[in-house]
Image (cartoon, grey):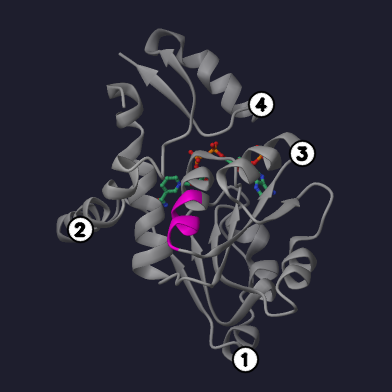
Amino acid sequence: MDLVTAAALPEVTATVWSNVFMISHLRPGETLLAHGGSSGIGTMAIQLAKAVGARVAVTAGGPEKLAACRELGADILIDYREQDFVEEVRRATDGAGADVILDILGAKYLARNLETLAVNGRLAIIGLQGGVKAELNLATLLSKSAAVTATGLRGRSLAQKSAIIAAVREHVWPLIGGGRVRPIVHSTVPMREAPEAHRVLESSTHVGKILLTT
Ligand SMILES: NC(=O)c1ccc[n+]([C@@H]2O[C@H](COP(=O)([O-])OP(=O)(O)OC[C@H]3O[C@@H](n4cnc5c(N)ncnc54)[C@H](OP(=O)(O)O)[C@@H]3O)[C@@H](O)[C@H]2O)c1
């Protein structure tokens, strides 16, 4: 692996491992729903969840993004522009729902994420692209014995960050070393062309990460 690709690894692996496995305890045979499956975070979530033997549902905007998710191993493909993810996940799981949801939309998806959760489900919010304030229906949460968490990497203590990195080294590095998991890099762009990289991100035509090089 070249140095630039290696540089993309710590943030995505630490975010996905800490939320999906250390906090939400995704287990083999369970179903993960990852919103934004073709994002840098989503592409890593698909691969790691498949590597531990989970079933993976993703949302993405359009057939090309979903095809990229399928190539990485996603089992249930949902075009959020055309389909209702609550219905699609229910249908694909015989009504059971998703055991873990990795969410990047925040407020916009909170109610529908709760509806999609299985009994004993865990919703891990890591992004707020769809806003910060929403109503949480505690009756739904209680009836499902479900849990909602929201975390960011930056706000963690040094001890927590160290524990995450140690876990990533133990569990994820061997998968990367063995070639089962890889960071998905859309393109590398020199720092002086950062505005162009931002334009690509805003148009959302990328799959995986865009790396700025110095
Ligand atoms: N909390 C943490 O520690 C932490 C750490 C890293 C990243 N994050 C967050 O994780 C998210 C992903 O980061 P990234 O760098 O991988 O971002 P990115 O590549 O820019 O991806 C953004 C994604 O959002 C998807 N999206 C937009 N609207 C959507 C909708 N209505 N339903 C489902 N998906 C939708 C896009 O899908 P389409 O292109 O298909 O429309 C795209 O894949 C960001 O919100 C970021 O802030 C959090």
Residue 63: give its label: 3
For label 1, the residue is: 143
Do the CB atoms of the residues marked 4 and 1 lie less than 8 Å apart?
Answer: no
Outermost residue toward the front? 178
Distance from disc 4 to disc 3, alpha carbons, whole Å, reads 16 Å
What kind of residue is marked 3? Pro
Q: Quadrant of the N terminus?
A: top left
For label 2, the residue is: 157
Q: Earlier in the sequence, mark 4 or mark 3?
A: 3
Which marked residue is nearer to the observer: mark 2 or mark 3? 3
- How far across and how far down the image is residue 172, in percent? 31, 51
What kind of residue is marked 4? Ser
Q: Earlier in the sequence, mark 3 or mark 1?
A: 3
Which region of the structure is painted magenta? 47-52
Secondary structure under tag 3 reads helix
- How far across and how far down the image is residue 182, in percent? 41, 38
Q: Earlier in the sequence, mark 2 or mark 3?
A: 3
